[in-house]
Amino acid sequence: MTSFSEFTSLCVKIESVPGSLEMTDIFAAFLKEADDDELAVSCYMIMGEIFPAWTGKKLGLGPNLLYSALSKAAGISPEKIQILLRQTGDVGETTCQALGDDKKSQSTFSSFLTDDGNEESSSKSGRLSIRDVYDRLKEIADVSGKGAQSQKIKTLQFLFSESSPEEAKYISRIALEELRIGIGEGIVRDSIAKAFDVPVSLVEFAFMVTNDLGQVAVVSKTGGVGALEKQHIRVDRPVKMMLAQVTNSIETAFTELGEAAIEWKFDGARLQIHKNGDDVRLYSRRLEDVTDSLPDVVQTVLSSVTAKDAVLDGEAVAIDENGKIRPFQDILRRFRRKYDVETTSHNIPIHVNLFDLLYADGESYIEKPLTERRNKLSGIVKAGAKGISVDELTITKDPEKAAEIYHAALNAGHEGIMIKNPSSPYSPGKRGKNWLKKKPVMDTLDLIVIGGEWGAGKRKNKIGSYVLACYDDVKNVYLEIGRVGTGLSDELLDSLTEQFADLIEAEDGVMMKIKPEVVFEIAFEEIQKSPNYPAGYALRFPRLVRVRDDKTIEEIDTIEKVGRMYQGQKETN
Ligand code: AMP
């Protein structure tokens, strides 16, 4: 059994090394020693997560709740916690200091205190096992209904009071899903391969189809290569969506692909459909289960998909009574709807445009070429069905033909076109060159909000501007790249201020630190090199295009993409 104190030492060690290779070595060594029932849990927690990716579940704990628990466990006032937060600017450090250095002034645990107040802290080290912490955090995520808040606080309080200040530092960071010690999925994948001596490519494959690195670790250890090879897509488990890269021009795309499959790029919301006999489950781009919000789509799938079992990929769009597309926000309203589902489904009908097939009638299709997947897809969806269709696909070598389709898509109110490699497999979670997207030139980046500033004058009591960051997907950290304060209507400012209210982690004067959870699509004129931001780049004239509630924080644009866009900009200037 591994203690949480050993896990804490692991985190400290990983934080102290700069490179991913060293991190891989350290984590691989840890995995080698871990018991079988700790393997999966270690993989989730080292990435600051509790649930495997396929569940789409998050801990969803607000900072205020954590501060209440901390205040109680440490026996210090909420005001004092706020002061510490302002001083340290970090939840973990605040927890550590509240439970450690400030102990002398506490009353709650005074009976344990020795002369210098520190012995008790260190004697607590090692009381909790890694599973204890995991199970309690999972309990926090699962409790709901009446009394849930106080139950959550109690559980956290228990964890804090049973751990040393340093352990508690990491518990806090995991509880807020902000561990960020530099380990992302890529490093965990490599560590599994190294620890159990199996090829990285096989671990990658197993991860793509199971969407669960914890499970892959267990399979690698217990069954090795043979068991990894047997992993496959399942109808009850969503996999990450295949994604597209931007192409600057249709011509460039054809130079890269030669022959290409062209489809409209629908302006809606991604939908992964799992049909298992009469049971249909629908998953959003973030892999949230949205089945209950879309009963009409469930019925449509049941009546028009002829395969018994299938995993389908497509884009759901909201339409009006004439079948014309409605704004993007309308479809999101449908996806999030928990009440009045029937009425809303009547008011905002949906049409699903299917464009891919991952699995059908017991057979996996992801390894097969796009053309073959599409043939099968057309064969299992009734033609002319209401509310669902297989989108039109044109295979051509002619950029002119693609340009025609592009203009037709824009005229119909859609975003542009997708230019796909006809012989490519379906690669879950990959944003590669096999799918290229062409939209009208307006450069945008999807960035995460990590902070904000209270407004003044007309914007008093509202968050008037937002601090934005891009993602370093290797190290799993966010890098600040600038701020946005324009493109925000009064109405939007109000709703955003409300949305962010429970995500504020710390305030310092007018500035605040925000729990990274909300994605902004930001338009800008130019990317510039800048020493002023940790990203090393800044955006000229940024403005908010829309709030991307359909995107997860792992999906925001990477520092690597910002760099590529900067280079591209230099080449076209
Ligand atoms: P973006 O959201 O800009 O990264 O563009 C990729 C998204 O376009 C996908 O995640 C889908 O939701 C959407 N999309 C619309 N039409 C298609 C299509 N024909 N093929 C693939 N993705 C599409």
Image (cartoon, rainbow, N blue to C red):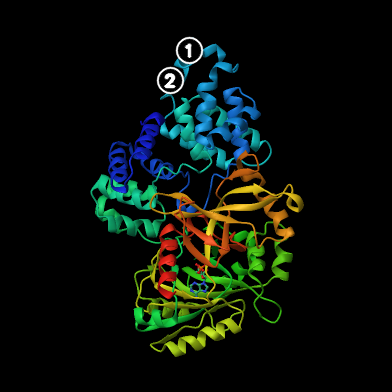
- Count residues near mark 2 (Cα–Cα under 10 Å), then give few for <14, some for 14-19, many for 20+: some
Dot 2 lies on which element? helix
Residue at x 52% of width, y 61% of height = 539
Q: Position of residue 428 (x, y in %)?
A: 41, 63
Query: Which of 124 and 443 lies nearest the eye of the viewer?
Result: 443
Label 2 – label 1 distance at C-alpha: 12 Å
Per the image, the residue denoted by label 1 is 116
- State which quarter of the image contains the C terminus: bottom left
Q: Is residue 429 visible?
A: no
Of the two numbered discs 2 and 1 in the rendering, the one whose residue sits closer to the viewer: 1
User: Which circle marks residue 16 in the picture?
Assistant: none
Q: Position of residue 156 (x, y in %)?
A: 56, 32
- Count residues near mark 1 (Cα–Cα under 10 Å), then give few for <14, some for 14-19, many for 20+: few
Per the image, the residue denoted by label 2 is 122
Query: Which of 214 and 480 lies nearest the eye of the viewer?
Result: 480
Q: Position of residue 50 (x, y in %)?
A: 47, 43
Residue furthest right as drawn: 458
Q: Going by the image, does 1 lie left or right of 292? A: left
Dot 1 lies on which element? loop
Residue at x 51% of width, y 13% of height = 113
Q: Would you identify the image quadrant in which residue 147 lies?
A: top right
Query: Which of 228 and 96 lies nearest the eye of the viewer?
Result: 96
Q: Amino acid at mark 1?
A: Asp
Q: Position of residue 68 (x, y in %)?
A: 63, 31
Q: Going by the image, does 116 lie left or right of 201? A: right
